[in-house]
Image (tube, helix red, strand yellow):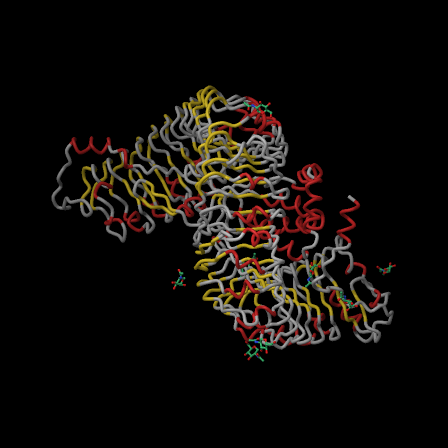
Amino acid sequence: MTMILLWLLFLPFCLINLSINTVLVTSLCVGNQQSLLLQMKKNLIFKSTKSQKLVHWNQSDDCCEWYGVTCNNKGHVITLDLSNEFISGQLQSSLFNLKHLENLNLAYNEFHSEIHSEFQNLNNLKYLNLSNAGFQGKLPNSISDLTQLVHLDLSFNNFTGPLPSFNRSKSLKVLSLNHNNFKGLVPSTHFEGLINLMSIDLGDNSLEGNFPSSLFRLQSLQILMLYYNKFDGHLEEIPNASLSLLEMVDLSGNNFEGPIPLSIFKLKRLLLLQLSKNKFNGTIQLDVIGRLQNLSTLDLAHNNLFVDASIRHEHEASSFPNLKRLWLASCNLSAFPEFLKYKSSMQFLDLSSNHISGPIPNWIWSFDYMVILNVSYNFLTDFEGPIHNLSSNLLKLDLHSNKLKGHAPTSFKNAIYLDYSSNRFNSINFTEIGGHTPFLYFLSLSNNSFNGRIHESFCNISGLRALDLSHNSFNGSIPICLTRMSSTLRLLDLGGNQLNGYVSDTFSTSCSLRFLDLSGNHLRGTIPKSLANCKHLQVLDLGKNQLTDGFPCFLNNISSLKVMVLRTNKLHGNIECPNNIGPWETLQIVDLAANNFSGILPAKLLQSWQALMIDEDKGGKFGHLYFNLYDDFNPLNFMAAIVDLNIELQMKLAKLNAAEPPFLIDHIVSHIFEEGVGLRSYEDSVTIVNKGHQLNLVKILIAFTSLDLSSNHFEGPIPEELMSLTALHALNLSQNGFSGRIPSSLGNLKHLESLDLSVNSLSGEIPIEVARLSFLSVVNLSCNDLVGRIPTGTQIQSFEADSFKDNEGLCGPPLTQNCSSEKRLSQEAYETAYSDDGSSVDWNFLSVELGLTFGLGIFILPLIYLKRWRIWYWKKVDDMLCRIVPQLGFVYENRRGEKHRILRRKK
Ligand SMILES: *[C@@H]1O[C@H](CO)[C@@H](O)[C@H](O)[C@H]1NC(C)=O
Ligand SMILES: *[C@@H]1O[C@H](CO)[C@@H](O)[C@H](O)[C@H]1NC(C)=O
Ligand SMILES: *[C@@H]1O[C@H](CO)[C@@H](O)[C@H](O)[C@H]1NC(C)=O
Ligand SMILES: *[C@@H]1O[C@H](CO)[C@@H](O)[C@H](O)[C@H]1NC(C)=O
Ligand SMILES: *[C@@H]1O[C@H](CO)[C@@H](O)[C@H](O)[C@H]1NC(C)=O
Ligand SMILES: *[C@@H]1O[C@H](CO)[C@@H](O)[C@H](O)[C@H]1NC(C)=O
Ligand SMILES: *[C@@H]1O[C@H](CO)[C@@H](O)[C@H](O)[C@H]1NC(C)=O
Ligand SMILES: *[C@@H]1O[C@H](CO)[C@@H](O)[C@H](O)[C@H]1NC(C)=O
């Protein structure tokens, strides 16, 4: 341990000198300085219990002695450091009267307000740090008047509006504007002539237009970060590239197109180059990186590039830079890049979504430091060598969506995350996976050809949080130890197997399941009462089994439930619950179809489904169903365990990475982390075809709300209360005994995309309001006793006549019968309609891909980067969790809908 601390203390690299000039001359506060400060303190709102500086300021002392205050030898306040003081509310104008200020640090506060005041008064400022201070709104243009600035850090706020010009601040060395909401074009003249600028970070804003080309002409520039904006167009060649000092360039997540300028590969000091997630095209011969001897991190993933990774001469390959992290996902690779054989310090390798076929070569397992390997979405068929003794330190291995067959490898003793889903594996050494992977947190064997009983050894993996065995041919009954294991498991998916017998009533009293899918098996008996212990359950799918029971009212203490699927079982009786005081407020998908439920729909139950009443009218409801494995879970405890156990590996990695600049490491950690928790995604528009209707998958997963009560024995009128579920996208009441009129308040369900009321005994006219539902794409009102003219509207006439057939008295388009001639339909036609199974849309929402975020970063990164980054990282985790937690479940993510990276499980 002491050794690690030692090298942490002597980090060799100091890119930017952050030291604040503290003048150690004691002098008396002059003039009105003290009263200005006290006035400011009086008006500022801050948490006095947590404050370390402000709280101690008082009249009786010289203000130059106060915490956070430094004066020059004339007694003028030149430094004010109020970082981390839990200040909220407005910035006080008295601050802007401290004209001699040179250093102002307000970082890490909670202002949550705009800055109205005039910066030009503070024209001596050299160091201004407002990072993470909660500021919002437009940044005053007067910031451009701070011509003495050397360091300006406005990162992690919510500043909006256009970027001001900085070209008068000729001394500027560090400019950090990342993680805000700046918009619009960035004129190249904004940075013209900033000859001292060493670092510029504009990442994660909404800036657009061409690349500000003056940046490439700044000869001192070392760090250039433009990631995650909306820049577009071609990138020019870099003038005098061989003289450039650039060390880190991240342009990922923009819309740059055309070829990658080859001069980029002449930036011989480069350590990090990230160009992923753009539209760069053309062919890249990977030899070009041969000259970049310092390059440790290269990311070309997700462009339209053809990367040719074959290196002609072996000696060239061995003199290649010592790459540590390489992302070549979606680069049209057709083989494993052989030159990697010689890169013994590889740590991350992502070759996913390429066309690599054949076996996985043995050398891939030979890297001592490789911790993350992703070869998913290729055409890999098997393993080159014997798989029982692959010695590897891998923490995460992603093999999913290949054609791997036979025996699945288990010899990854450090593994935290193993995804073998969507392959053709048929066997695995259960004893070994249970006994030799103590850190395993996530295991998916989904969609393979495993069979036989589910082995009890899964229960021995004490850290396991997610176990997905769905879509195999496992048979026998569910091991009792698995239901007991619900005290630690967050996700258990056994759907789509051949399991039979009873579900044992042994869910732990401290059940922490979020997701339980037992659907598509042959399970019998009743719904276990102990399931009520799973108070955090969000998704429950027991559909397509042979369960015989009443409606599970006893689950109504699970207030987090969002999805309840009980379809196609033998459940019966009334669905009224005796004391349903506000249960299931978050339910968004209720599927009770194809059971034997009966009686009228209880108004009280419908009224309790609050989430279905929220009128989401703000547009842009795109994203995925988020299921979060680490909500309400204390990563510190978990890490404490894991970190200590893996200390040897950590020490090796730490040593290996010690020579890299902290800024680079922070940047990579943040990159991987944000991917891991789903803030950065690539694939976001997959469509599925559902009985001929194309539906945008993204839309379904995120905002999808539905109520399917079809094929039961419900009766009575359609209750008015149902019409207050205004958020519904799909409503299916078909094949029941509903009678009476269609309520005209149906018009309230203005988000409805699918409406099926067919095969009931509904009478009266079709209310005109139905014609006004502008999102309807599926309608079926056939086989009722409806009469009168079909109302005319924008959509309704475009549906097939089938949607209305077999209603004796219905007329007008799209039906052929004219409203004057009241022809009656024959009994024959009625019967054909009954046999028409295609009338109900099978909203098989859970069988489409389920967005499952997994906070890979949380577990893996600290392991790799040890203490320094661990501390940094917890801050980050906190920030991230704040951003993510309110979005748990069905995420209505609009601002950055494209930034979800989802671990997909395809069936
Ligand atoms: C950092 O700044 C201080 C004060 O300006 C100066 O004395 C010191 O030499 C600088 N250190 C480096 C490594 O530039
Ligand atoms: C003012 O500060 C001094 C020194 O920090 C302290 O001893 C004194 O109690 C403070 N007075 C008040 C009124 O807080
Ligand atoms: C701003 O302050 C924060 C918190 O003290 C610090 O992490 C960051 O490095 C500072 N920025 C600059 C440019 O010094
Ligand atoms: C950022 O500001 C915009 C516009 O002022 C606002 O709509 C948005 O909610 C803010 N975002 C956050 C995270 O505060
Ligand atoms: C500074 O930037 C402004 C705004 O982009 C521009 O109008 C002006 O010409 C620039 N000045 C110089 C000297 O480049
Ligand atoms: C390239 O470098 C040369 C020599 O340092 C200099 O004269 C010239 O202006 C530079 N060109 C550009 C476009 O920066
Ligand atoms: C690259 O994309 C551009 C459009 O941005 C297109 O004109 C060009 O033909 C493409 N080049 C290649 C090699 O595909
Ligand atoms: C499974 O692994 C264990 C422990 O490594 C070994 O003893 C056993 O022979 C293996 N079983 C099979 C069927 O390979």
- Seen from the viewer's position, the closer of residues 523 and 400 is 400
Quarter holding residue 30: bottom right
Q: In what quadrant does ligand 6 lie?
A: bottom right
Residue 684, given in percent of the width and then of the height, sits at 44, 50
User: 15 or 567, which is in the foreground?
Assistant: 15
Q: Residue at x 75, y 53 (%)?
A: 50
- Number of numbered discs present? 0
Q: At which x and y percent is residue 669?
A: 62, 51
Quadrant into which the C terminus falls:
top left
Residue 630 location (% of width, % of height): 59, 40
Q: Can residue 113 be seen?
A: no
Question: Quadrant of residue 691 in the image?
Answer: top left
The answer to whether 639 appears left or right of 311 in the picture is: right
In the image, taking residue 565 as reference, residue 442 lies left or right, namely right
Is 663 above or below relative to 866?
below
Q: Residue at 51% across / 48% down in the picture? A: 337
Classify the position of the N terminus by image quarter: top right
Task: Work out whether residue 431 or residue 781 is closer to the camera in this orientation and state it.
Answer: 431
Residue drawn at 81 percent across, 76 percent down? 31
Asked whether, in this view, residue 857 is left or right of residue 757, the answer is right
Note whether residue 352 is visible. yes
Residue at the image point whose x is 16% and y is 31% from the top: 828
Q: Position of residue 124 (x, y in %)?
A: 72, 75
